Amino acid sequence: MTKLSKKKDTAAAQEDALTTFAALVATAGVESDVRALQDGGADEGTLNEQLTRELGLAHDRWGLGLGHLRHEAQLVREGERPDVALLVDGAVRARVSEGARALAATYTPMQALGAEGLSEWGVLEDGHRVTLRPGLGQMRVLVEDARDFETLWSAERGGVWTRTWRKGETLAVEVHRPASPATALADAAWDVIASIKDRKFQRELMERSNSVGMLGALLGARHSSAGDALAQLPEAHFTVSAAVVRETGRSARDLERWKAMVREGQESLDALQGANTKRLAAVLSGGLR
């Protein structure tokens, strides 16, 4: 093999790895810019920084509750074949070429979910976790005067939960509405079935859903391997369940800004989950070839 053909093969393999990574973070509504940077001649260090930034944003939105760990993504090579490695606290734990099912299985043992589907891990490695009392007096003190702190989850309207923390000069609010990939796909399947114009076929699927669920009914109407095809997609293993809003500087000590952050997080989560349902509906409508 000539040096030129070897270089072309390496570039193609790297493109495959970046495509797979882009599909992974897309499940969190993250549009990857790594390919554009690569095409623009960015060096590997710059690409790794962007990969890590996009993976971090995806973790914010997946809501796996692993914010206490350090997540990075790096280009690696197994022989001549490039891949994207996912690191946790500096150690390689998985590669995107292993597939979304394996990636999800890597993160699952790290989680500690309670009865409500909320993480029992704190975001900060050390420090007191505060149970909020009714009213804003306690939060005012925390936001305006406290150093590093973290609150426990607080229930809000519409099945939403929030928690707040400060690390250094950064104040952060997480808004979380527990949602599994299976639930997200079922919601999307409902939208697909509801949009079917053939009323007879629609009724058949609705009746079938009583025994196998919306997703099962829709997959049963596809080709025999549709379920297996879906299981290979990142959407079957990752979905949006959270939004994180961060603030630094003087405004990170302002209670009114904190209240605005909570609203922004709720609006962002609503928009992200709504867009995710539409995207999944498009996937399910596509036939799952």
Image: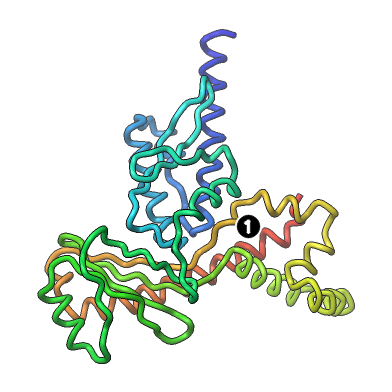
Badge 1 density bin: few <14, some 14–19, many ≥20, Cα 10 Å = many
Q: 289 or 156, which lies in front?
A: 156
Residue 150 versus residue 103 in the image, above or below: below
The chosen color scheme is rainbow
The N terminus is located in which quarter? top right
Residue 272 image offset from top left, x and y in percent: 48, 68
Residue 76 image offset from top left, x and y in percent: 44, 30
Q: Is residue 276 left or right of residue 126?
A: right
Q: Is residue 152 left or right of residue 223?
A: left
When asked about the image quadrant of residue 282, the answer is: bottom right
When asked about the image quadrant of residue 63, the answer is: bottom left
Q: Which residue is mark 1?
A: 236
The residue under the point 37% across, 37% down is: 48
Amino acid type of the residue that numbered disc 1 sits on in the rendered structure = Ala
Secondary element at image label 1: helix
Count of marks placed on residues = 1
Residue 37 versus residue 241 in the image, above or below: above
Work out which residue is located at the far top of the displayed protein and give it: 2
Q: Is residue 178 left or right of residue 45?
A: right
When asked about the image quadrant of residue 223, the answer is: bottom right
Residue 75 image offset from top left, x and y in percent: 43, 33
The residue under the point 49% across, 71% down is: 117
The residue under the point 41% across, 62% down is: 65
The residue under the point 75% across, 73% down is: 213
Residue 131 versus residue 37 in the image, above or below: below
Q: 95 or 229, which lies in front?
A: 95
Work out which residue is located at the far right of the displayed protein and give it: 200
